[in-house]
Amino acid sequence: MKSSDAELSHLVAQIALKDGDAFRAVYERTSPKLFGVCLRILKDREDAQDALQEVYVKIWRNAQRFAGSNVGPMPWLCAIARNHAIDVLRARRPASDSLEEGAQQFPDDAPDPESTAVIKGEGRRIDRCMQELDPQRAEAVKSAYVEGLSYQELAKRHAVPLNTMRTWLRRSLLSLRECMER
Amino acid sequence: MSNPDQSEGDRARDEVLAGEYVLGVLSAESRARVEARIRRDRPFAAIVARWEENLSPLNDEYEAIAPPDFILPMVERRVLATRRRALASRTSTFAGLWGSLAFWRTLALASIFLFAGTMFFTFVAPLPGAPDAGRSGQRQPAPLRPLAELAGQNNAVSLIARYSAGDGILRLTPVATAGDQPHSLELWVIDGNDKAVSLGILPQSGEGELAVPQALRPKLKDGVTLAVSLEPYGGSPSGAPTGPVLALGKAQMP
């Protein structure tokens, strides 16, 4: 773990103890990144400002969950910001789908999540694994993640039917999973 | 597979569902359902956490942009109510010491050294029964005094250990509890290259008190390593640590 990560972990852990100074320190270090997340997903400055406030209130409330999460501090903080911004986006532009719709049987070649969740340093492997995907599908995965696009929006952008986009992304996720375990 | 009641196809479907959730492609309704499941299904939550970690290099795509200055005061005002309560507890008297923020903060600060990568196990008070300046003549029940601080290397979980040699009681108090999923904290003693031996399960929060079995008491000696791991609820099924080690430290007896 990098020392800056270690310091940030420590500060987030202190927020769990309701330490206002640690909260401010975390805000000062991380708010530009998290504001960038909110802006990129919401594409509106005022919405992003509102979202950023909610994100830090959530960080204050949920800091205790960080301790046992096995996720690095920046990924953890970014996940809170992404999740909140995506929720706002979905509320603004309702997308419909169903968990069951298009459900398929997939071969199970994934290892036990609990034994691998603790493995650190899979990190940059994502780059290599993304390169193994078809370029158009890799682009779809990336824009889904970075911009928080729904299946419908991705299908429209890539000019493919909705079910094709679903299949692309689901197969891509399984390929990524398989690749990162190698 | 960890979950015998789950078919293999379901496992692959969970992988995909967790990945879809982390990518952010699901609808509001599906997201709410996935989030509810994360809260009650620990193996599924682990899959989500792994996707979050694995996809996190894509966060490099987000440019850092300074937010306007007025946001921080607004956020601070909103969390002020809780913060004020915390400040009040800092001024609490001796009786409230264990619950006081200042106390825990001091402990937590100690863990900074841990993050440098070294193991850390420091006596903060002499062992009961050890020569104690000015009080060695008095006969009184041996109080449980702080024995050691154990701080996590990656997880920022800190514990304080207090041991009473007289009755063999070892008490551990987690500084920050680990998430809200059902789990147990298990304490292990490791002597040299020997396999870890379980000293027992700690309560999830509050004060952890363990009666060290008579047979294991000789193991609590200079140079042994104490470790706390996160285990399935009820403790390790295999008798050896299976989960991540949240904290560890080496004992140095005087």
Image (cartoon, coloured by chain):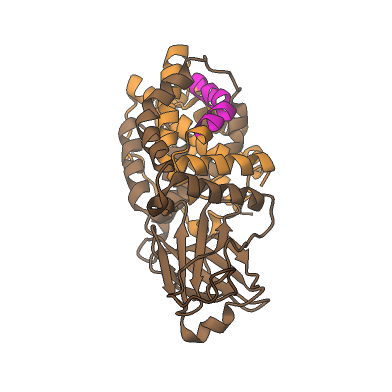
Chain colours: A orange, B brown
| View extreme (bottom): residue | B215
Q: Is residue B188 left or right of residue B223?
A: left
The residue at 43%/54% (across/down) is B98
Q: Does the magenta-highlighted stretch encompass residue B1?
A: no
Q: Is residue A90 left or right of residue B247?
A: left
Q: Quadrant of residue A50?
A: top left
Of residue B118 and residue A30, the one placed in the foreground of this image is: B118
The residue at 55%/56% (across/down) is A116
Residue B67: x and y in percent read 53, 17
The residue at 38%/38% (across/down) is B88
Q: Is the magenta region chiefly helix, strand or loop?
A: helix
Residue A173 is at least partly visible in this image: no
The residue at 48%/21% (across/down) is B72
Of residue B192 and residue B109, the one placed in the foreground of this image is: B109
Residue B219: x and y in percent read 58, 80
Residue A9 is at least partly visible in this image: yes
How many numbered discs? 0
> Is residue A92 positioned above or below A163 on the image?
above
> Is residue B164 positioned above or below B46 on the image?
below
Indicate the quadrant containing the C terminus of chain B: top left, top right, bottom left or bottom right.
Answer: bottom right
Of residue B170 and residue B179, the one placed in the foreground of this image is: B170
Q: Quadrant of residue B34?
A: top left
Residue B173: x and y in percent read 45, 60
Q: Magenta segment range?
A: A23-40
Residue A121: x and y in percent read 65, 49
Q: Does the magenta-highlighted stretch encompass residue A34?
A: yes
